[in-house]
Amino acid sequence: MATDPSGAPGAAPSRRVPEAVHRRRWAILAVLLLSLLIVVLDNSILNVAMKTIATPAPTGLGATQSELEWAINSYTLVFAGILFTAGVLGDRLGRKKVLLFGMAVFGIGSVLSALSGSPHELIAFRAVMGFGGAFVMPATLAIIVNVFEREEQPKAIGIWAGAVGLAVAIGPITGGILLDHFWWGSVFLVNVPIVITAVIAMSLLVPDSRDPKPGRLDPLGVVLSVAGLVLLVYGIIKGGQLADFTDPEVYGTACGGLLILALFVLHERRSGHPALDVRWFRKPAFSAAVSSIALVFFALMGVTFFTVFYTQSVRGFTPLQSGLLMLPLAAAHMFFAVRVRRVVAKFGVRAVCTSGMVMVAATMAGFLLLDRDTPVWVLEVLLFFQGASMAHIMPPATVSIMQSLPRDKAGSGSAVNNTFRQLGGALGIAVLGSVLSTTYRDGISARLDALPGLTDEARHAAGESIEATLNAAARLGPQGKELIGPANDAFVHAMHVTVLCASSSALLGAVVVALFLPKRGAVRPAAGAARPDGQKEQAGAGA
């Protein structure tokens, strides 16, 4: 309700959000969730389809494990690399315009990915999808911050985060159904009708907003960030592929990536219009929350990457069954994410996020209980508590990030939030995927060496992943059956080593949050505090 112009006692406090927008804020949120759904849905569907894509043609593309990692990371790296610029463009040109542009590019990339004829084409077209997605994610969160008053933002962001759980549930199941009836490309083509529906609804309902004093673009910063990330991740993945991190190609590219990223930070500190304003990291509520999101996604994405091979390659579940097994994680995340604000109000954001990180570490370590014949309910219990734990991290951390910055900088703040989430996920897949690959190769190499008739090149390729070993075993006929049991054992051992690394990263996140995140998250502005645009911000509930 708008302020009574008479200024009479009892009049409602003034709103920063226009009344017409405020009335339809929940309908706007529902439309924005469609765009979030499409981005998360795509990645969760791809996880289920990885085994199929790794299968030789005509069933799949015959992708190796490193190519599968790049199919995920080409999307993630482009996404993360241009998020800063996408956020600034949204603040400058209008978030609705940028959102619609991103959805259109994402839809085009989906069609091209579905029609890929080789792993390299899929990697390239996934990068196109990442380019479109980078314009979608920061715009959705920035628009939410601009259509909801401060006191309702935790609830809206909780629903936003809960939608991630819904997408995690729908994605694998949808992917399993599609793979049971259609070719692997259908998991990308399914995005198109959702994109069309979302674009029409956004055009009609979503208001436009922008920063009245937007920053200038930073092309050099974008180039440095993308180049540094690509070289670093390439070096890590190549090390896992070669099982040799002392190879000059491995440490040369990885160290080159680190050097370029260091130059990126120096450039951002000196720039008058940085793509990433490093001054924001002086705020504990911002920097600790960003770090916690990056570390939890490092652990989660790395574990998600190998879980599909455990359920399908080792345990023999179909893609649909594998998707259904993810329901406890998704359901728990969706259920608790929309309710966590009440727990935060009682105990504080620091206590809730720290507890959530510790529980994520515990559930990661719980994967040590999984073997070739462990009852499946053990996996389901672990996934349920993992989803519940993440629901107690993502919403309060996101609220802490967004409320620690001015509302006019919502696009840039959202870009940083999503960049570090994607960066954490990319490094998780690269680092933990390399740990998995190297450990697996060490466990299966003796068996492969004992097989006659394999060339050195074929033996090296067969040792890269369990799927490569099983494909080699199928080609060898009866002789190859001797590989199946040892391959499963080697993979389970490699999985156990990998989850210990994932659990350690989550524990590190718990320490960071406990030490540096303020008890109540973002600092609440005082009532009537002056804002850069000359208006006054009403006091509202903090994170």
Image (spheres, rainbow, N blue to C red):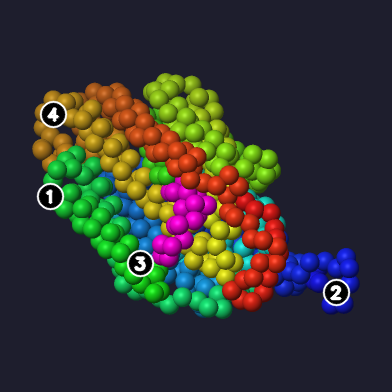
Tell me residue 134's x, y (percent). 45, 64
- Which mark identifies residue 91? none
Query: First in sequence: mark 2 or mark 1?
Result: 2
Q: SS class of the residue under badge 2?
A: loop
Circle 3: residue type: Glu
**Which residue is labeled 4 in the image?**
449
Query: First in sequence: mark 1 or mark 4?
Result: 1
Mark 1–mark 4 contact, CB under 8 Å? no
Crowding at mark 3 (Cα within 10 Å: few <14, some 14-19, many 20+): many
Circle 1: residue type: Pro
Q: SS class of the residue under badge 4?
A: helix
Distance Cα–Cα, label 1 vs label 3: 30 Å
Circle 4: residue type: Asp
Tell me residue 317's x, y (percent). 45, 33
Looking at the image, which residue is at 34% across and 70% down? 270
| Quadrant of the drawing holding the N terminus | bottom right
- Magenta span covers which residues? 276-294
Looking at the image, which residue is at 22% across and 52% down? 254
Looking at the image, which residue is at 52% across and 73% down? 91
**Which residue is labeled 3 in the image?**
268
Circle 2: residue type: Gly
Please state if 185 lies on the left or on the right of 10 as rendered.
left
Distance Cα–Cα, label 2 vs label 4: 85 Å
**Which residue is labeled 1 in the image?**
248
Query: Which circle, 2 or 1, is nearer the viewer?
Result: 2
Crowding at mark 4 (Cα within 10 Å: few <14, some 14-19, many 20+): some
**Which residue is labeled 2 in the image?**
7
Query: First in sequence: mark 1 or mark 3?
Result: 1
Magenta-colored segment: predominant secondary structure: helix
Please tell me whether residue 275 is drawn above or below residue 318 in the rendered image. below
Looking at the image, which residue is at 45% across and 33% down? 361
